[in-house]
């Protein structure tokens, strides 16, 4: 029988739920008892969750950014040869799905006094604490609607709704580009700080994610659409780079109600031109020495990419991953041309929208950004190539903070 992964002894006396901040394993990964498979945020601190036994990670019941009751499984570990279906009824998450916001968005019930434990500590859920911390909201002045007056997410959201101009800190989704992985966002994440939830999923066929199940661009988007639908947050900010920018744009086109803002960093899909030679070189490289010149083509200053960077990048590019990305590149960029066109989707985007592009981009020409609608903000970064979030993380973080603030104010970029 599937073995549930639970928060276990990390739960405290007054704790009802935890916030899942990171999964360090993916469905299908083999794990051993004691391996750290997830990280959750409790009322006390960030806590690592270990695998309770050897096996294969099966269904994840609580995705990153989701709040789950402490007695509910975060996911399941399957024994060798065990069917995934055996985990389906072993336990269901006791948190509201994104399509059913009622429990978290209903009007907070007034309470006679703020919730406090003996000794003066405010009793609040991890999600409530994170939202309040990001918005600068003092929980000691807030009454809670949960058991024993516990402050819930709905209480914080109600307080923020009553204070226009306070940032409700919706999660930010960062989608990396072709042949990269979630680690590429490290510099930008450090600039943005820890006060906002950053979700960094990996595109199919990248990092630890399996290859896309379908052919073409739609086959790449489909798993990411499932991932988006599984997120508990009602709305999210989307940020995408290169191929990840194209995926972000496609997600915004298919789920416009879920997207609070859209920031595209040198996105694909806005014209036929692309440096197919560089893509092919990255795909076929089997040694750091052969990968290095192609990585340097991604930036304006080749000195940013040294031998150590190339060795680290090559270490994660095994034969199976290279083969999957070579096949994907052949479908998406046949004969060195972008084989999909998202300009009609871009024209229909109706949320705060920014495009960030390096003037020295040798992979995707910045003039493709001129396909953007009139309300979009366009930032052309001098002395920057195809990787603005790596080459100029401080500036990109500043731009992102501006678009997040614009989305919060409700005025967008149309004011």
Image (cartoon, rainbow, N blue to C red):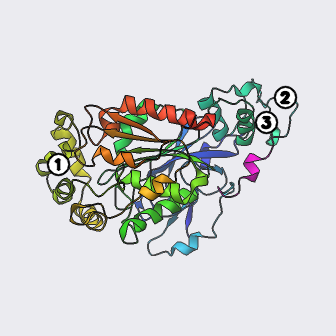
Quadrant including the C terminus: top right
Q: Nearer the viewer, residue 268 or 347?
A: 347
Q: Nearer the viewer, residue 207 or 254?
A: 254
**Residue appearing at x 61%, y 57% in the figure:** 73
Residue tagged by mark 1?
294
Residue tagged by mark 2?
113
* Label 2 packing within 10 angstroms: few (<14), some (14-19), many (20+): few
Disc on the earlier residue, 2 or 1: 2
Disc on the earlier residue, 1 or 3: 3
Separation of marks 2 and 1 at Cα, in angstroms: 62 Å
Q: Nearer the viewer, residue 40 or 183?
A: 183
**Residue appearing at x 20%, y 38% in the figure:** 305
Please provide percent x and percent y for residue 217.
38, 65
**Residue appearing at x 24%, y 64% in the figure:** 326
Q: Nearer the viewer, mark 1 or mark 3?
A: 1
User: Residue 154's image quarter?
Assistant: top right
Residue tagged by mark 3?
144
| Magenta residue span | 98-108
Quadrant including the N terminus: bottom right
Asked whether, in this view, residue 30 is left or right of residue 313, the answer is right
Separation of marks 3 and 2 at Cα, in angstroms: 8 Å
């Amino acid at each position: 029988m599937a073995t549930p992964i639970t928060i276990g002894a990390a739960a405290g006396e007054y704790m009802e739920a935890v916030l899942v901040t990171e999964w360090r394993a993916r469905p299908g990964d083999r794990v051993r008892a004691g391996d750290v498979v997830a990280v959750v945020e409790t009322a006390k601190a960030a806590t690592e969750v270990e695998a309770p036994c050897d096996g294969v990670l099966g269904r994840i019941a609580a995705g990153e950014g989701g709040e789950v009751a402490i007695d509910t499984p975060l996911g399941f570990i399957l024994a060798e040869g065990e069917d995934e279906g055996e985990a389906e009824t072993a336990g269901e998450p006791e948190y509201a799905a994104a399509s059913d916001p009622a429990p978290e968005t209903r009007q907070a019930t007034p309470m006679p006094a703020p919730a406090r434990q003996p000794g003066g500590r405010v009793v609040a859920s991890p999600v409530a604490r994170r939202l309040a911390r990001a918005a600068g909201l003092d929980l000691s002045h807030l009454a809670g609607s949960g058991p024993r007056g516990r402050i819930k997410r709905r209480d914080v959201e109600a307080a923020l709704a009553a204070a226009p101009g306070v940032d409700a800190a919706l999660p930010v989704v960062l989608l990396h580009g072709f042949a990269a992985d979630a680690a590429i966002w490290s510099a930008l994440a450090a600039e943005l700080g820890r006060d906002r939830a950053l979700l960094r999923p990996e595109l199919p066929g990248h990092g630890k994610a399996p290859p896309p199940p379908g052919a073409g661009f739609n086959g790449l988007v489909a798993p990411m659409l499932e991932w988006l639908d599984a997120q508990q947050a009602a709305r999210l900010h989307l940020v995408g780079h290169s191929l990840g920018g194209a995926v972000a744009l496609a997600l915004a086109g298919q789920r416009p109600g879920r997207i609070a803002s859209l920031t595209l960093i040198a996105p694909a899909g806005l014209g036929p031109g692309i440096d197919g030679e560089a893509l092919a070189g990255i795909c076929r490289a089997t040694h750091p020495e052969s990968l290095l010149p192609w990585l340097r083509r991604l930036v304006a200053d080749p000195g940013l990419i040294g031998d150590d960077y190339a060795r680290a990048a090559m270490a994660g590019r095994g034969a199976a991953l290279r083969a999957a990305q070579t096949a994907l590149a052949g479908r998406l960029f046949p004969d060195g041309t972008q084989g999909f066109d998202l300009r009609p989707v871009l024209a229909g985007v109706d949320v705060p929208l920014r495009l960030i592009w390096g003037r020295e981009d040798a992979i995707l020409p910045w003039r493709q950004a001129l396909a953007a609608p009139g309300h979009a903000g366009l930032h052309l970064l001098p002395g920057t190539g195809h990787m603005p979030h790596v080459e100029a993380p401080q500036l990109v973080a500043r731009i992102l903070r501006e678009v997040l603030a614009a989305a919060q104010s409700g005025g967008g970029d149309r004011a």
